[in-house]
């Protein structure tokens, strides 16, 4: 490890640069950091070069197109020696490689905020950084804070770092980033401030293990007490304790190991690395590990820890706490016994004030002495919660038992209704598509939208007898099943790969347009810089595709671009999508999402990623129609993103299952029993006969 002391990881003189700086999370965090410590010299983001990031009350942060451009453009005295990586998982490898290539002479430390980076990529990053003599923390770190120098990287400290982190003598090292903030706040009630707060991250592979960070804390003159927050998964704590047993400069440690109750209840802490693999990675084992190292039982708040000459010797290594709110009491006890001077006058004691209880029914799995009672919700949150409940589905919370209730349908003994609209009235309107949309969403479409919805259903009826869904119906029919069974077989053959692409396209489009203020997707004068979004997405796709190929990993495709049949012409079209596009044009209409897809297909060809212009397939057209129709409801928060994606999937599924009924009728009349069976001489055995 390059760092020899804690301040080598972060100090006041450090110059910080940020990848993907214009992203929603990165930009918000950087603005707070810049107001707190002004240590960010620049950042980079695809397609955003030359567009500075504004900082309220401070100097704008320069933004470059790439790490190479940043390193080339900044003067020598401003070249960054610390880098924060906010890039998507598939782009992290390429970013780190570029940082090392162009900044290895100045960069000392990388903080990789991104979570869920693959193990293969993480291992390669570790090797590259070791060869370049660059320390790397993460992946999935929240960052680090040096409270004495008043500097941070990442989001440690939230929006107000000075409130949680007063300079002091406690180093906090945590798997969870948010717990760094929580423990720092708790310690203030014991009169203790923070020297350093660091989130190691909790992906499967932690790039800087606990034992190496502990060595820095043990050698740090400002640090008198170390606090650890530990989750299940990994052998890092075992390695750390083995190191501590052989280390001369012992400092007291307070360890909090979480996850045992959740593990017993089959609930997850949520971090990718908090997965138990073997006995030595369980929370129970880690508790025993620290208890054996400390040589004392876990802290008990009611116990009197005497002041005999033996007590300091018993507690010099520290103690384990069983619940987080015991931290101030345990820290105060150690300071008293070991003669550690407090950093300041203790503040108001930290108390638990739980607003909501029984997360996912976990309460029934907790011991009675751990059950909590609901606290009082303080203002302004109390008013906001009341307003949220009032504005969400009237005065009724969105979640409730629906065993004998429904928003979608009703029957009072005389009239059946759909979202309050009598079924007889819908029959008189005479449009199955219009009434179906009402049943799925609770709101009605205009005439043009109904026409497009109906065309989507028709287009989904069939794509020939060789498709997976049609094969399901034919197989079921040849086995002698009833029509409903054949239709069920079709539905069973529809999934995320076949038919679910429309759902993925909805998510993709929402991500692409999330930073815009799009009001009306049907208005050609929408005011959105569509060309910039297209360029950004094309460059993102190119970058993550190249990075994944170089790393030997799979890359994320753009949903609904390309078709296995319509792919060999210079410009490819799915004829079904073309009918939908022509319908929009013929009615003097416009759909910004479909326009985006067409422009993106051409842009990907122009930058050399594809040899021809890919087709926008039917699933993509369905997603564009559905998202545009639901856009106002999404903005008004009267419909969920999940429902919009599910509707795109349901259109395909409903159309295809209707077509499957046709396959059933045809096969039943003209097929022969068992004619879908593959002859023995056409089947290949991939294993040898044994026995």
Image (cartoon, helix red, strand yellow):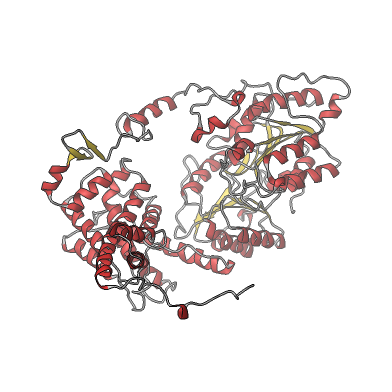
Residue 264 location, x and y as percent?
61, 38
Question: Looking at the rendering, which quadrant does residue 330 occupy?
Answer: top right
Above or below, 80 relative to 539: above
Question: Looking at the rendering, which quadrant does residue 220 occupy?
Answer: top right
Residue 525 in sight from this viewpoint: yes
Q: Nearer the viewer, residue 266 or 566?
A: 266
Q: Nearer the viewer, residue 565 or 469?
A: 469
Residue 401 location, x and y as percent?
37, 33
Residue furthest out toward the right: 309
Decide if residue 443 is on the left or right side of residue 191.
left
Residue 165 in sight from this viewpoint: no
Residue furthest out toward the bottom: 681
What is the total number of numbered labels drawn onto the structure image?
0
Residue 671 location, x and y as percent?
29, 73
Decide if residue 541 is on the left or right side of residue 142.
left
Q: Residue at x 84, y 29 (%)?
A: 314
Above or below, 111 relative to 36: below
User: What quarter of the picture does the C terminus occupy?
Assistant: bottom right
Q: Residue at x 63, y 32 (%)?
A: 183
Residue 195 location, x and y as percent?
70, 36
Q: Residue at x 75, y 48 (%)?
A: 212
Residue furthest out toward the left: 428
Q: Residue at x 33, y 48 (%)?
A: 517
Q: Nearer the viewer, residue 82 or 249?
A: 249
């Amino acid at each position: 490890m390059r760092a020899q002391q804690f301040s080598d990881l972060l100090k006041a003189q450090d110059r910080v640069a940020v990848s993907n700086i214009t992203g929603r999370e990165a930009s918000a965090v950087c603005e707070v950091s810049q107001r707190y410590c002004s240590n960010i010299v620049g950042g980079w983001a695809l397609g955003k070069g030359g567009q500075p990031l504004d900082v309220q009350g401070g100097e704008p942060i320069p933004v470059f197109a790439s790490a190479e451009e940043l390193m080339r453009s900044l003067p020598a005295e401003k070249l960054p020696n610390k880098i924060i990586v906010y890039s998507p998982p598939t782009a992290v490898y390429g970013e780190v490689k570029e940082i090392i290539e162009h900044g290895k002479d100045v960069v000392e430390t990388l903080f990789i905020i991104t979570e869920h980076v693959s193990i293969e990529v993480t291992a390669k990053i570790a090797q590259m950084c070791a060869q370049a003599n660059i320390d790397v923390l993460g992946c999935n770190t929240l960052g680090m804070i040096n409270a004495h120098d008043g500097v941070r990287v990442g989001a440690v400290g939230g929006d107000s770092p000075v409130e949680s982190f007063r300079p002091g003598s406690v180093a906090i090292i945590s798997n969870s980033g948010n717990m760094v903030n929580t423990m720092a706040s708790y310690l203030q009630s014991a009169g203790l401030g923070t020297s350093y707060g660091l989130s190691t991250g909790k992906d499967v592979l932690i790039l800087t293990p606990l034992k190496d960070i502990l060595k820095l804390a043990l050698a740090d003159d400002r640090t008198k007490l170390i606090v650890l927050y530990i989750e299940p998964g990994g052998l890092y704590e075992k390695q750390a304790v083995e190191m501590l047993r052989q280390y001369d400069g012992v400092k007291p440690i307070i360890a909090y190991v979480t996850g045992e109750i959740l593990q017993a209840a089959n609930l997850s802490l949520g971090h990718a690395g908090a997965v138990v693999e073997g006995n030595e990675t369980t929370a129970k084992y880690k508790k025993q590990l620290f208890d054996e190292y400390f040589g004392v039982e876990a802290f008990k708040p009611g116990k009197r820890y005497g002041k005999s000459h033996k007590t300091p010797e018993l507690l010099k290594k520290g103690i384990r706490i069983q619940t987080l709110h015991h931290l101030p009491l345990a820290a105060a006890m150690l300071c008293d016994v070991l003669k550690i001077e407090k950093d300041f006058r203790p503040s108001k004691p930290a108390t638990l004030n739980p607003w909501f209880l029984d997360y996912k029914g976990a309460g029934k799995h907790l011991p009675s002495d751990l059950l909590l009672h609901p606290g009082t919700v303080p203002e302004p949150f109390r008013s906001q919660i009341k307003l949220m409940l009032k504005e969400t589905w009237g005065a009724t919370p969105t979640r409730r038992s629906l065993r004998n209730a429904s928003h979608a349908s009703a029957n009072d003994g005389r009239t059946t209704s759909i979202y309050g609209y009598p079924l007889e009235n819908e029959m008189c309107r005479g449009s199955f598509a219009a009434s179906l949309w009402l049943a799925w969403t609770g709101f009605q479409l205009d005439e043009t939208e109904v026409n497009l919805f109906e065309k989507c259903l028709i287009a989904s009826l069939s794509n020939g007898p060789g498709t997976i869904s049609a094969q399901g119906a034919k197989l079921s029919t040849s086995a002698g099943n009833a029509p409903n069974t054949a239709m069920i077989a079709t539905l069973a053959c529809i999934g995320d790969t076949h038919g679910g692409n429309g759902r993925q396209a909805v998510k993709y489009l929402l991500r692409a347009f999330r930073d815009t203020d799009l009001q009306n997707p049907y208005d050609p004068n929408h005011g959105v810089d569509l060309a910039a979004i297209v360029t950004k997405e094309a460059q993102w796709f190119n970058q993550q595709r190249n990075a994944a190929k170089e790393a030997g990993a799979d890359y994320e495709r753009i949903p609904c671009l390309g078709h296995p049949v319509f792919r060999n012409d210079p410009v490819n079209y799915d004829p079904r999508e073309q009918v939908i596009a022509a319908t929009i044009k013929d009615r003097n209409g416009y759909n910004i999402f479909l326009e985006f897809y067409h422009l993106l297909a051409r842009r990907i060809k122009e930058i050399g990623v594809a040899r021809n212009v890919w087709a926008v397939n039917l699933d993509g057209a369905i997603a564009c129609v559905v998202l545009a129709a639901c856009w106002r409801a999404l903005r008004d928060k009267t419909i969920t993103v999940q429902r919009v994606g599910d509707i795109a999937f349901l259109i395909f599924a409903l159309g295809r299952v209707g077509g499957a009924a046709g396959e059933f009728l045809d096969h039943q009349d003209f097929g022969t029993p068992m004619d879908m069976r593959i002859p023995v001489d056409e089947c290949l055995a991939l294993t040898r006969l044994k026995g």
